[in-house]
Image (tube, rainbow, N blue to C red):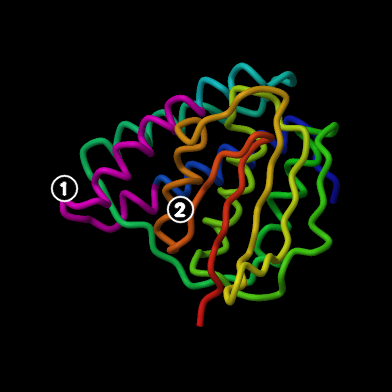
Amino acid sequence: MAVDEAGAWKTIAQKRSRLANELVRREADRSSSIAHDLRGFVQIVKLGTAELARRQTTPVNDGFDLLGELQQTADRVKTSPLAILGAPAVVANAIEPAIDLVRVVAPRLEIDVAGAPDRAVRCSAFELEEIVLALALDAPANALSLAVDQHVDADHAWARFRATYDGAVSEEDLGIASVLARRADGGLVVTARGVVIRLPFSA
């Protein structure tokens, strides 16, 4: 069933809040690198909440608090930093729901996922969705294109996520995507045209 813009924004908020709640579910050592990552995530959620408010053009009048859930969860994560866990997911299958939402809320974005690999990476399906949403929606500049494919570099094969923008973007702008990539033994690189995320395939 087709979803309208208001419904898509509602679903995006629910998905991103669910990720934050996963962080709240499992405690981690506050002095660990996880705790540092989560403090950064709290800031990203807060900034993302403001950005969602700015970009939402269609009001939601069904009683659902589109932004309040994200803000409330961010406040909870501040006092209970937790680990992000999940079973490895097949990239092509996992990103489909997020791609469908992005097509609705960012119809001018050029999307190419025909080459998305049918292989699993060290991220859960929900984390892969979050990477897609972050690349498409979190940067201060408008995203122009988003592509997902497989890239072979020397003797290594990677799942590659590429996004281009109409202005400058930093790693800090895409903090949660960077955190998730690093925790999956991958990484995020800022290029002259945008951002590239590489994720190793799981064994």
User: Residue shown at 71%/32% (left/top)?
Assistant: 143
Tell me the residue that label 2 is attached to: 180
Amino acid type of the residue tagged 2 in the rendering:
Leu
Label 1–label 2 contact, CB within 8 A:
no
Return the residue nearer the eye: 160 or 191. Answer: 191
Dominant secondary structure, magenta: helix
154 drawn magenta = no
Amino acid type of the residue tagged 1 in the rendering:
Arg
Residue closest to the far front: 154
| Residues rendered magenta in the picture | 21-48
**Tally of numbered tags:** 2
Return the residue nearer the eye: 116 or 192. Answer: 192
CA separation in Å, label 1 and label 2: 18 Å
23 drawn magenta = yes
Measuring from the top left, give residue 119's x and y in whole percent: 65, 75
Is 93 drawn above or below residue 74 in the view shown? below
Indicate which label's residue lies in the foreground, 1 or 2. Answer: 2
User: Residue shown at 31%/31% (left/top)?
Assistant: 75
Query: Seen in the image, is 119 located left or right of residue 79?
Result: right
For numbered disc 1, what is the local secondary structure? loop
Return the residue nearer the eye: 29 or 150. Answer: 150
Is 37 drawn above or below residue 185 in the view shown? above
Please tell me the numbered disc located at residue 76.
Answer: none
Please tell me the numbered disc located at residue 30.
Answer: 1
For numbered disc 2, what is the local secondary structure? helix
Is 110 drawn above or below residue 86 in the view shown? above
Measuring from the top left, give residue 186's x and y in whole percent: 48, 60
Query: Seen in the image, is 8 located left or right of residue 169?
Result: right
Measuring from the top left, give residue 132's x and y in whole percent: 63, 48
